[in-house]
Image: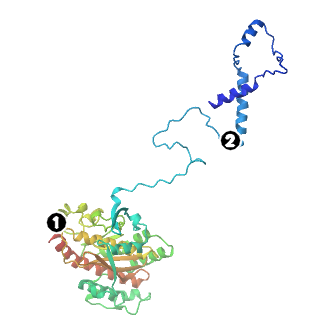
Amino acid sequence: MIDALGCVLTWLEAIPQEHHENGQEPPRKRARLDLEKDRYNAEKPRHLPTPSVASARASEKTYTVTKRSLDSHGTTEMPASPKRRRRGDGDDGSVGQQPDSTPRPRKRPLVPADTLESVSVGGSSRQSVYSCASSGVSRNSFPRKQLRNASLQSTGFRLASFAMDDARLPASLRELCHDLERIHSGVVILPEWLRSELEAFRVPVTITFADNDETNSLRYPPLDFVRRVLKRAVECDMDCEGESSWNVDVHGPLLDWVLRKDPNRLLVDFRCCTSAGLIHEYKPKDAPSKMVDFCLAIRPNEEEQQAIDHLCRRRPGLSINHTEWGNLTRHPIAISIETKHQGGDSAVALLQMATWHSAQWRSLRWGNPEQGNLEFLPGILVQGHDWKFVATTLGEDGMATTFKSLQLGNTESIPDIYKLAVSLQRLKHWAEYEYWPAFKADVLGL
């Protein structure tokens, strides 16, 4: 519409005007053929002639130049299209933010209704958003903040120390800790056949060689295997390789040798389960889900497996454990392992293990809250070379307590790898002869 109006205005400016000077008529522009008719028409309202095509094109060109001139002097531009665009659903009527448009607050995302919880402040009740994000206990929160939150929840856990809280340890846990400390302190007796093979290496003076019942009851990895593990561990450390490299090339082979190379006893096996999440019914309240890297699990015989499968039909997640991952739904978890690369955050590893153990205790007590034969859950925290032992007990108030930590060994030297192999065999023995009988009695009723 504005284009046509501009053309008309420009055309009007181009029409010759009639000037009256001293009351005299202006000279005629063209000859009048019919004077009487012209005199008659002069007494009637005069109609403007229709512009020609050439004049219309000239007017359009003039209007375009005039429009640009107005715009350059700050005149607000009017929309060029005469049509009005129909506003669709969800259309705010603007293509972009205009300079003179009214400022509007940013839209906030809607909060699901199930995240609202009524809280009381000063005797009055109000609705507040209570979620992991608002309370500061999301997955991305600092681990120490998540640890504090866990200590305040009835479904959470506390932290304790083996060194300072020895009196609180169950008898079976105290005995296991004593054996692990003895192994790590160097009071290790290696078989005589290893003496000659280790002469070329720096062997601590506390390590002795003998042939007796203890050395005959244990297995010792071949020296070439130990050297391969050492070589790869040093490479992972020096080249700053990630956690997956440590798991595949260092931790996994050690667990494989301890658990799968024993021809006499195959009851305990391990699984790499980095994606195993917690079943919702067992997860601590207001805490992010946590996972571990390896689990040592029991592989029961056929009769025991039938009892497990029958029980799983009425358990959350149809699982005998606190996770729905793979065959861990059918094989009871005895020992859990959380790994980090060299220099990884030990607080994060402890948080993951404590959360995992807390959920495991609720799984073990599902349907049978009474105190049972099982007194603690062992775990291993691995940070690069270093392997540490932790354990979690369950108090009478139903809250878990995670004790930290004892050295098991490391992969920085050949003698230390032998120490680690002996420590892992001690834990394997515990899983077979202490954990599994207690689990069958408490959970399966066998």
Which residue is identified by label 1? Answer: 307
The numbered dot on residue 75 is 2
The numbered dot on residue 293 is none
Query: What is the CA distance from the residue labelled 1 to the residue labelled 2?
Result: 86 Å
Dot 2 amino acid type: Thr
- Looking at the image, the residue that sits furthest to the bottom is 205
Mark 1 or mark 2, which has the lower sequence index?
A: 2
- At a point 42% along the width and 76% down the height, the residue shown is 346
Between 279 and 70, the one nearer to me in the picture? 70
Residue 417 position, x and y percent, is 39, 81
Residue 262 position, x and y percent, is 28, 75
- Looking at the image, the residue that sits furthest to the front is 23
- At a point 85% along the width and 20% down the height, the residue shown is 22
Left or right? Give the position of 55 relative to 213. Answer: right
**Vertical placement of residue 177 versus 148, above or below:** below
- Looking at the image, the residue that sits furthest to the right is 22
Q: Helix or strand or loop: what does disc 2 sit on? A: loop
- At a point 65% along the width and 41% down the height, the residue shown is 76
Residue 333 in view (yes/no): no
Residue 45 in view (yes/no): yes
- At a point 44% along the width and 73% down the height, the residue shown is 341
Left or right? Give the position of 45 relative to 260. Answer: right
Left or right? Give the position of 6 relative to 402. Answer: right
Residue 364: name its quadrant. bottom left
Residue 291: name its quadrant. bottom left
Between 286 and 198, the one nearer to me in the picture? 286
**Vertical placement of residue 16 versus 293, above or below:** above
Q: Quadrant of the N terminus?
A: top right
Dot 1 amino acid type: Ala
**Vertical placement of residue 355 versus 215, above or below:** above
